[in-house]
Image: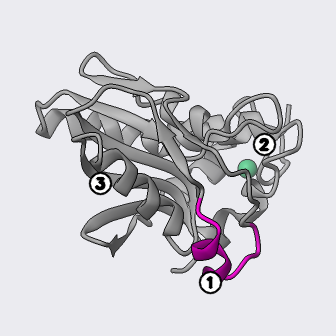
């Protein structure tokens, strides 16, 4: 098979060279409404990979990216933080048969890290892609949360643009007594 990034022959989804390139620490941090949001990749570095999202290869690529980022992050996190935490994916609306965000959160499941699936759902299916901040503010996702209350949560989304979605998700969870510790995204578009 071939590396899904450079298309050279490779046994793994990404060849050794591409793994090294993708593994280079490019974690960036943004703070929105007291919420720290960490992103593992700069959007332009993995843009070609992310554009596969709705293609047959998207599933493999998201999984492989999650192993290089979310998986390593959570192993490091639990070494330093003994609390029970929950992981909540922000945008789990399924258009292509599976949720891309669930592919990311799936890699974070550990003994004391519980991944909640389909507990935070957007009632509005408005498409934000390419839309300006004003449009996003006027058309909220209108999230409904049906998971456990009074827990510690790490929020996860695949891409952060303006941050309005994550901000709205945090506010909804807080109404359920939840402490949102921080948020993680695969890529930040605005850095
Ligand atoms: Zn490669």
Nearer the observer, 186 or 18 = 186
Q: Is residue 98 left or right of residue 150?
A: right
Which is nearer the N-term, disc 1 or disc 3?
1
Q: Residue under circle 2?
A: 3
| Residue at position x 26%, y 30% in the image | 149
Counting every numbered tag in the picture gives: 3
Q: CA distance from mark 3 to mark 2?
A: 33 Å
Q: Residues within 10 Å of mark 2 (few under 14, many from 20)?
A: some
Comparing labels 1 and 3, the label whose residue is closer to the camera: 1
Task: Indicate the position of residue 123 as horizontal and vertical percent values.
Answer: 64, 45
Q: Residue at x 57, y 75 (%)?
A: 137
**In the image, residue 110 above or below residue 38:** above
**Could you say where residue 141 lies in the image, as x and y percent from the top left?**
60, 56
Numbered range of the magenta stretch: 129-140
In reply to whether residue 157 is colored magenta, the answer given is no
Q: Is residue 190 above or below residue 151?
A: below
Residue 34 relative to residue 58: left or right: left
Query: Residue at (29%, 64%) from the top-left corner?
Result: 35
N-terminal of the pair, mark 2 or mark 1, is 2
Q: CA distance from mark 2 to mark 1?
A: 39 Å
Mark 1 = which residue?
Answer: 134
User: Between disc 3 and disc 2, whose residue precedes?
Assistant: 2
Task: Give how far across and how far down residue 155 sits, in percent.
Answer: 40, 47
Quadrant in the picture for residue 88: top left
Q: Nearer the viewer, mark 3 or mark 2?
A: 3
Label 1: which secondary element:
helix
Q: Is mark 2 within 8 Å of ligand 1?
A: yes
> What residue sits right under mark 3 in the picture?
182
């Amino acid at each position: 098979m071939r590396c899904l990034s450079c298309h050279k022959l490779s046994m793994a989804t990404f060849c050794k060279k591409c793994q090294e390139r993708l593994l280079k620490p490019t974690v960036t941090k943004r703070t929105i409404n007291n919420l720290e949001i960490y992103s593992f990749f700069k959007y332009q570095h993995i843009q070609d990979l992310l554009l596969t999202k709705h293609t047959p290869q998207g599933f493999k690529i998201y999984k492989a990216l999650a192993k290089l980022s979310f998986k390593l992050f959570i192993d490091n996190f639990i070494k330093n933080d003994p609390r029970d935490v929950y992981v909540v994916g922000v945008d789990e609306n399924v258009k292509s048969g599976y949720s891309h965000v669930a592919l990311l959160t799936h890699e974070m499941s550990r003994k004391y890290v519980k991944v909640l699936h389909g507990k935070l759902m957007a009632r509005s299916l408005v498409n934000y892609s390419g839309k300006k901040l004003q449009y996003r503010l006027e058309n909220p996702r209108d999230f409904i949360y049906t998971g456990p209350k009074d827990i510690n949560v790490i929020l996860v989304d695949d891409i952060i643009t303006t941050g309005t979605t994550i901000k709205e998700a945090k506010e909804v969870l807080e109404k359920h007594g939840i402490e949102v510790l921080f948020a993680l995204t695969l890529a930040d578009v605005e850095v």
